[in-house]
Image (cartoon, grey):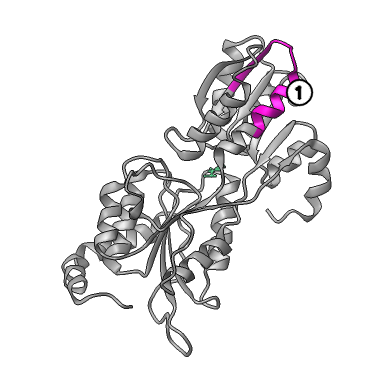
Amino acid sequence: MSHSKHKRISVVGALAATALMALAACSSGGSTGTTTSGAAAGSGDKLITVGFSQVGSESGWRAANTKDIQETLTKENGFDLKFSDAQQKQENQIQAIRTYIAQGVDVIAFSPVVESGWDAVLEEAKAAKIPVVLTDRAVDSKDTSLYVTFLGSDFIKEGKAAGDWAVTEFGDKPTNIVELQGTTGSAPANDRMAGFKEAIASHTNLKIIASQTGNFTRSEGKTVMEGFLQANPSIDLVFAHNDDMGLGAIEAIEAAGKVPGKDIKIVTVDAVHDGMQALADGKINFIAECSPLLGQQLADVVKQVMAGKTPEKRIITTETTFTQEQAKAALPTRKY
Ligand code: GYE
């Protein structure tokens, strides 16, 4: 590791507290990456130590994302990955990042649970000269020198794709829409909502009659949908910010004696396996894809940074949309 003497001194000062925090960070999600002990044992180049703070394990998307990152940032590929799961809590992420700073990792990567409130900890990373890569979700920090790049999807575009589909599907018909929002304050929830609203804005027959967060989970999606069904006798469309909440909504709709995909249509974002299956089965009507396979791009960015290069400030993941027919065709060869 090429850290300054000055930094080593401050690291020593923080060591006692850090040991405990590191344990907490590593044990919280149950899924830890490799540890540094003996990391460079054997031969060859030194491994690049990456501290990764994951949002949580709230969805199928997140499970696929975690798997991809852990399978890509391996020792064989030159990385020593430290992984922690923040269980959808910002304070856990801040603590994990502080632990990585104190440990003197080479690069910190994280998927910020919400957009705001990161400046202080990012300034600490900057002061320690540890580059930070935003993976999957954005922060709203004005000072963009606090991170190297933001690598992930265009969530506004995904919301727009869902809204454009609704415009085409419902035409001039009066349409009551309920919205299952992602985690309040998260970049994908903010942007998917904005993109969807923009797409339907000039079509006044399309009305969002209720919106509530389901926190990107299947169980909360179901509970919120139950409430929507009780309060609103006539719902034509569910816009769920991810597949999992859409899958929860399917359960609620069926329990209410209605047919998902027919009596009440459903549009979601992600296109993970279970969502694609429900789409192929006719229970979901349309999905805007959001790829969780960010591991390789993250590995590339980290290697660039370590080689002293400057990656692009914004790296956008390529993605598509799926109709029911397209889902049937894509499912057999889908990776997640
Ligand atoms: O859409 C959702 C997950 O940040 C893009 O988080 C990600 C979102 C994804 O929980 O399923």
Secondary structure state at the residue bearing disc 1: helix
Quadrant position of ligand 1: top right
Q: Residue at x 78, y 36 (%)?
A: 323
Is 176 inside the magenta-drawn segment? yes
Residue 22 shown left or right of residue 302 in the figure: left
Q: Residue at x 26, y 54 (%)?
A: 123
| Quarter residue 226 falls in | top right
Is 275 inside the magenta-drawn segment? no
Q: Which residue is mark 1?
A: 169
Query: Residue 198: x, y in percent?
Result: 57, 25
Query: Residue 187: x, y in percent?
Result: 47, 39
Query: Residue 3: x, y in percent?
Result: 27, 75
Residue 139 vertical position relative to residue 160 in the rendered view, above or below: below
Residue 192 vertical position relative to residue 276 in the rendered view, above or below: above
Foreground pick, 280 / 312: 312
Residue numbers of the magenta segment: 161-178
Can the viewer see residue 157 in this picture?
yes
Residue 78 shown left or right of residue 142 in the figure: right
Residue 280 shown left or right of residue 39 in the figure: right
Residue 245 vertical position relative to residue 314 in the rendered view, above or below: above
Query: Residue 217: x, y in percent?
Result: 54, 37
